[in-house]
Image: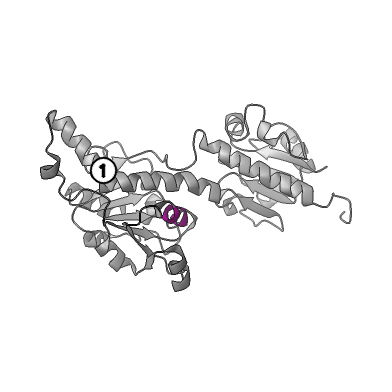
Amino acid sequence: MIEYAVAVGSDRLAERLFGPRHEALAGVPARRVGEVLTEFESDAARRVLSRAEVLLTGWDTPPLPATVLGHAPRLRRVIHAGGAVDHLFPDGAHGIAHSDTGVANAIPVAEFTLAMIILANNDAFRAQELYRERRTRIDREAEFVTAGNYGRTVGMVSASRTGRAVIELLRPFPTLCVLVYDPFLTPQEAEELGVEKVDLPDLVRRSDIVTLHAPVLPETVGLFDAELLALMRDGATLINTARGAIVDAAALEKELVTRRINAILDVTDPEPLPPASPLYDLPNVFLTPHVAGSMGTELRRMGDVVAGDLARYAREAEPLGAGEA
């Protein structure tokens, strides 16, 4: 039977992922070694590492540089409760297989994005502000002439895992036109997804909602600059559930202060914003503290995915010692 260890940021996080007694892992044909590891430097942690064939990691797991991996001679696989796992290996993975739960984490982000698209097209945030301000009957036909989801256009920046999950959730809304900018998306893939592939300026000009799902790469940092923001339609909404660095923060603030466009920002640059930022108080900005991804009950979904991955590995792995030193 293979042996595994749990190495996440805290006991509390481990319980949120796997249950109070780690019941999500109870049926896995593998033996857990030691307590939850929150560091790799102590003698106790190194004893656990020396036995572990699989390491279950997550948010706030310390890095695994070569000096740490040197204490884990049996380690074959890392299963990460989170997105990309490369940051855990500053000196490279040295042949250790690894997987993540990015697909599972894309689900709540996509659901949050769908909700925001529907509410933004309905002008729900301005309606709330108006009702709070006037505290009397609101003439919908006079105040919300352009509100609604019929015949609107959603521009998707990146057909990433999350972007594709949003596209799937939009399928039941056939009157919403979905545009996608992604230099790696082929015309055939766009057709299969039921979207129109366009260049970025065209997407920004045509969209009522622009929603960002691109990863942070050298070519995407500051991608949404003043020039692109100026192309957005009056009254259009920018949704960012990806990373704040994709948007030029100063240019976005300057544009939002004019109240020409709206923004739904679950991520910012910096994060959090400084207390004096005007974005906290602007009526055309809906600001949330990075809550679109897995949290609360959503963490258990990621834990279940990790447990399933571990169970598959345990069933398929060749026992250590059988053909391996």
Between residue 229 and residue 295, name the one nearer to us: 295
Instruction: For the N terminus, give its image quadrant.
Output: top right
Q: Dividing the picture into quarters, in which one does residue 282 lie? A: top left
Indicate the quadrant where residue 207 lies: bottom left
**Residue found 41% across the figure and 55% down from its top:** 171
Write the residue at 52% across / 46% down. Answer: 105
Closer to us: 290 or 66 = 290
Q: Amino acid at mark 1?
A: Val
Q: Residue at x 62, y 40 (%)?
A: 304
Number of marks? 1
Q: Is residue 59 magenta?
A: no
Q: Main secondary structure of the magenta part?
A: helix
Q: Position of residue 84 (x, y in %)?
A: 55, 52
Write down the region rendered in magenta.
Answer: 163-168
- Camera sees residue 206: yes
Q: Quadrant of the C terminus?
A: bottom right
Above or below, comparing residue 39 to residue 268 in the picture? above
Question: In this orientation, which residue lies closer to the viewer: 122 or 241?
Answer: 122
Q: Is residue 40 visible?
A: no
Q: Is residue 319 left or right of residue 151?
A: right
Circle 1 sits on which residue? 285
